[in-house]
């Protein structure tokens, strides 16, 4: 089974992101707008239960923090992904590091760049046009993050929540 760890922003921010995604992201119908903390990985149901225990511990040792968007950016020339840039904070970076540390030896292909994807799998021309028209758009948005989620992928390719973890001691 495929699993992943994400933060879902508030409905207000998801609605804003989806106003772009429905046009520019072919994964629009498979997963809600999210900030990836741990990329998709293979695990068994038994592994997931053990992982959930570890994630619960990490969550209890992590205080809620503020998530801020600042601008629209792109990963070009590495790939044609357009995204809302999330300002990296000490808490977010530590959460990413702590969670990924639990997957000893599973190094990410890319450095951690906090973002919420709004467009992907675009042709070079399409990317250039879309990013050119969006890159000056200000997306100053701020909200409190108090949870993250372990997701799993269904047979149809869509993702659903396996378990939610609240930050801080309850």
Image (cartoon, rainbow, N blue to C red):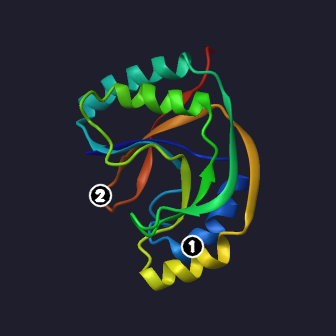
The disc at residue 155 is 2
Residue placed most toward the observer, 28 or 39: 39
Question: Residue 131 placed where, x, y %?
Answer: 58, 74
Q: Which quadrant is home to the N terminus?
A: top left
- Which residue is painted at 70% across and 53% down in the image? 70
Looking at the rendering, which quadrant does residue 5 occupy? top left
How crowded pointer 2 is (Cα within 10 Å; few <14, some 14-19, many 20+) is rated as few
Q: Secondary structure at mark 1?
A: helix
Q: Secondary structure at mark 2?
A: loop
User: Is label 1 or label 2 in front?
Assistant: 1
Please state if 106 lies on the left or on the right of 148 as rendered. left
Q: Is residue 167 above or below residue 148?
A: above
The disc at residue 119 is none
- Which residue is painted at 61% across and 53% down in the image? 85
Please state if 157 lies on the left or on the right of 105 as rendered. right
The disc, 1 or 2, on the residue closer to the chain's N-terminal end is 1
Question: Residue 113 placed where, x, y %?
Answer: 50, 47
Question: Residue 145 placed where, x, y %?
Answer: 66, 35
- Which residue is painted at 53% across and 23% down in the image? 59
Residue that mark 1 sits on: 22
């Amino acid at each position: 089974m495929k699993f992943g760890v994400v933060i879902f922003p508030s409905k207000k921010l998801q609605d804003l992101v989806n106003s772009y995604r429905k046009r520019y992201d072919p994964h629009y119908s498979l997963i809600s707008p999210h900030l990836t903390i741990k990329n998709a990985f293979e695990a068994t149901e038994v592994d997931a239960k053990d992982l959930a225990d570890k994630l619960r511990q990490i969550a209890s040792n992590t205080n809620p923090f503020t998530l801020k968007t600042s601008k629209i950016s792109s990963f070009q020339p590495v790939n044609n992904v357009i995204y809302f840039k999330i300002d990296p904070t000490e808490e977010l970076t530590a959460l990413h590091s702590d969670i990924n540390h639990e997957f000893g030896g599973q190094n990410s292909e890319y450095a951690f760049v906090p973002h919420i994807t709004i467009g992907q799998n675009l042709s070079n021309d399409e990317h250039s046009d879309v990013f050119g028209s969006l890159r000056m758009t200000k997306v100053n948005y701020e909200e409190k993050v108090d949870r993250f989620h372990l997701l799993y992928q269904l047979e149809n390719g869509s993702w659903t929540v396996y378990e939610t973890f609240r930050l801080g001691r309850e």
